[in-house]
């Protein structure tokens, strides 16, 4: 059984660029959530995908968007990057639809630096 | 921003000592979770709590779901060097299924 894998592990972009981060969910998990973790802070919920549909969104602007694919893997896209977007982006998968937060398994994250 | 207040922000303790940390919220939670995050890794679940007043242990870790449903506590007994890391509380409200709110974390440093 493979865990949650994220790619790339590190990424450097410049302000105004666009970025795509990828996540493969744990085997048997159909729900994927994305979190942003700024330095010295706890993770903040961006959005969740269940059965390829967005299923809840945190307080993030529309330039943060996502996709979930039929194999339950997911992408996080950020347009018009800003310096404050520099953070660790965590993907978490879980086996349920809504709820089952105790079954969330996190990947190791993608460290994004915006210069 | 963060809606959970987690304290203390950091702790420097000697091996063998007990550690206590807590989280308070302005909202009522139906689930409290405690995670540990090591450098370069994602958070790993330590304990999950589901009912007010619930007290749950996982080895040397004990956590409690506060009676008011707005707070939670984590205790680590007889700390060892591998307890070093950042501990996060997280909660879920009834109107935000599947969405966790995290505290800012407690950095634990254990010295021999």
Image (tube, rainbow, N blue to C red):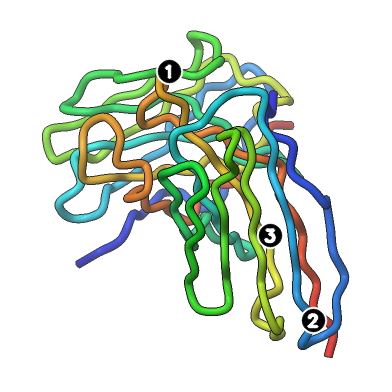
Residue A41 appears left or right of B46: right
**Quick one: B60 or B88, which is closer to the camera?**
B60
Residue carrying label 1: A57
How many other residues sit within 10 Å of disc 2, few (<14), some (14-19) or many (≥20)? Answer: few
> How far across and down, in percent of the image, does residue B36 sit?
58, 61
Chain ID of residue with mark 3? B
Name the front one of labels 2 and 3: 2
Count of number-bearing discs? 3
Q: CA distance from mark 3 to mark 1?
A: 26 Å
N-terminal label among 2 and 3: 2
Q: Are marks 2 and 3 in contact (CB under 8 Å)?
A: no
Residue on which disc 2 sits: B17
In the image: residue B57, left or right of residue A100? right
Marks 1 and 2 share the same chain: no
The residue identified by callout 3 is B86
Which quadrant would the N terminus of chain A be assigned to in this image?
bottom left
Q: Is residue A36 left or right of residue A97?
A: right
Q: Does A20 sit above or below residue B43? A: above
Could you tell me residue A67's position as x and y percent? Answer: 29, 25
Spot the residue most to the bottom. Answer: B112
Corner quadrant of residue B51: top left
Output the chain of dot 2.
Answer: B
Same chain check for tags 2 and 3: yes
Q: Is residue A5 above or below residue B26?
A: below
Q: Residue at x 54, y 47 (%)?
A: B65
Element class at badge 1: strand
Q: Nearer the viewer, residue A51 or B76?
A: B76
Percent across and percent down for residue B35 are: 55, 56
């Amino acid at each position: 059984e493979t865990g949650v894998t994220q790619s790339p592990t590190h990424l450097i972009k410049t302000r105004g660029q666009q970025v795509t981060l990828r996540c493969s969910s744990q085997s048997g998990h159909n729900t994927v959530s994305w979190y942003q973790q700024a330095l010295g802070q706890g993770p903040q919920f961006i959005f969740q995908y269940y059965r390829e549909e967005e299923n809840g969104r945190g307080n993030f602007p529309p330039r943060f968007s996502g996709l979930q694919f039929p194999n339950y893997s997911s992408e996080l896209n950020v347009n018009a990057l800003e310096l404050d977007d520099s953070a660790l982006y965590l993907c978490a998968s879980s086996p349920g639809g809504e709820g089952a937060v105790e079954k969330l398994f996190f990947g190791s994250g993608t460290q994004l630096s915006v210069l | 921003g963060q809606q959970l207040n987690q304290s203390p922000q950091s702790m420097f303790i000697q091996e063998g000592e007990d550690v206590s940390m807590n989280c308070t919220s302005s909202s009522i939670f139906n689930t409290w979770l405690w995670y540990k995050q090591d450098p370069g890794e994602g958070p790993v679940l330590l304990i999950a709590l589901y009912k007010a007043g619930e007290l749950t242990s996982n080895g040397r870790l004990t956590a409690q779901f506060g009676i008011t449903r707005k707070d939670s506590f984590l205790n680590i007994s007889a700390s060892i060097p591998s307890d070093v890391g950042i501990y996060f509380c997280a909660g879920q409200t009834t109107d935000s299924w599947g969405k966790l709110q995290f505290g800012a974390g407690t950095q634990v440093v254990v010295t021999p």
